[in-house]
Amino acid sequence: MSGGERHNVVLFVADQWRAKDTGYWGNAVVETPQIDRLAAEGAGFRGCFVQNPVSTPSRASMASGWYCHVNGHRTMHSMLRGHEPNMLRYFKEAGYHVWWGGKNDMIAEEVITASCDERVTGTGGRETINVSPWKPGDRLYHTFLWGEVPGNYGMSLSDDYVAAQAAEFVKTPIRQPFFMLVNQTYPHPPYAAPQPYFSMYERRRVPFPIPPPEEFRGKPQILRRIHERMRMDELTEDELREIVAVYYGMVTKTDRNLGIIMEALKESGAWENTIVVATSDHGDFVGDYLLTEKTQNTFEDVLVNVPFAIRVPGCEPLPTACEALIEMIDLLPTLADACGIELGHTHFGRSLLPLLRGETADHREYVFSEGGALEAEVHTHETDRPEENIYWSRVALQGAEPEVHGKAVMIRSKEWKYVRRLYDTDELYDLRSDPDEVNNVVDEASVAPVREQLAAAMLDWFVETGDQVPWRWDLRGPGESHPEWSRGAARHGFVKEWSAR
């Protein structure tokens, strides 16, 4: 398969993979040889941050280059619509054959056809099993710890099918350059893994989860409330290590599927002309702070710092893992820049090519993430869940106690993290002395200048990114004409669709 003069693209996106659970990041226990190899042959970033700690808003930002607040993409049901730009559609309109496998959580259903040529989901007809080992009311029911599952466990089997279909695709000659979005559901909980991954890690060797401060002092109320509902204080140390070990098995299985696709690229001859990216939409507590899964309005690094490894043909490998701060919104302009794709909308990403070419070691002074809702924004809540549902601990709080689900924004530098909240405590962490974010110093007088500096930088960011104006003008009268840039914007399908309405 040949991409001609234009680079092919393979974008491999896991669900809930934390940056610190990769070998290239510095974790000496977890086995991730494939993403480590990709980082060694290109670049691996230790400081990649997503713009929201849950999937749909995070993926919408990745595909559009917008922060969540720019166009209201901050809920699980606010996906990119026909009048809005998205990464897949840009590449399809540029003549790429777009293959999309696995979950969505990004693009509205009615825009899928306009955004891809092939859509692959399911398990290829194989029967799957998704049964919790616990009954409602059991001590472990809401902890997401399932343990060992059979080989046809649903999420595991669907990931394998999508990876296998992706590998088959790259071995089939087509004339166009191709863009592949390969989504994986692992290592999203429940923490459930088939053999050999379930038994791969000695429980005594995995790192013990980060404990919360006593009585969650200095932390937002939502963490304590979810902790109580999950009954996490009833878990033993062995059970906490079990969560980490099973999660590590899920990570290694996901990494293996990345390797299957990379090997197919090399066997087919497409490797040399293909950009390969491996990343995730957000992280997971995995027992840290005596919590599992994630929240929608807290921004611990375990939730918003994700793996990001990329290889761009023509760029020499970076000698070590890159320490520059980057954001997931930087992906769209990076791929567009490398492939000569014209973007037709205002976005806030910055191409990573100067970093990848070794022209600079710095990229951003600050990274941002945001989430939560106003108390009155009932339309932003996820569907309410009964206590018998595994997600009840977190999701039902949105309706029952909306103030704990309130809007919040994070600004993070290499040294400091500041979180501003509407209805709860603000947070400030000195990441040099407190990398685990357990000592909130927001009220300490000695760090007031730092807090004020970060708050001012956050305000500047909101002013800069508060909205986006479509590039296509609405003419005010019959005697007015479009300037060239306005006519040029109409080349993009999402602009044409919007203009026709």
Image (cartoon, rainbow, N blue to C red):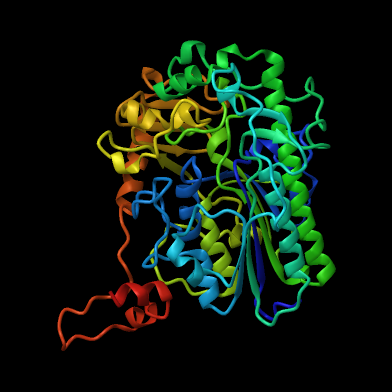
Q: Is residue 74 left or right of residue 24?
A: left
Residue name at image x 67 percent, y 71 percent = 8
Residue name at image x 39 percent, y 17 percent = 444
Which of the 4 quarters of the picture holds residue 264?
bottom right
How far across and how far down the image is residue 113, in percent? 50, 70
Which of the 4 quarters of the picture holds residue 270?
bottom right
Q: Nearer the viewer, residue 392 or 168?
A: 392
How far across and how far down the image is residue 176, in percent? 65, 80
How far across and how far down the image is residue 443, in percent? 36, 19
How far across and how far down the image is residue 267, in percent? 84, 67
Q: Which residue is outermost to the bottom?
A: 479
Q: Nearer the viewer, residue 60 or 481?
A: 60
In the image, residue 151 sits, relative to residue 144, either above or below, namely below
Query: Does the image show residue 312?
Result: no
Q: Nearer the viewer, residue 36 or 71?
A: 71
Query: Does the image show residue 121?
Result: yes
Residue name at image x 45 percent, y 66 percent = 111
How many labels were placed on the picture?
0
Q: Quadrant of the N terminus?
A: bottom right
In the image, residue 91 sits, relative to residue 307, either above or below, namely below
Q: Is residue 216 left or right of residue 251?
A: left
Residue name at image x 50 percent, y 32 percent = 391
Q: Is residue 228 left or right of residue 145?
A: left
Q: Quadrant of the C terminus?
A: bottom left
In the image, residue 44 sits, relative to residue 201, either above or below, namely below
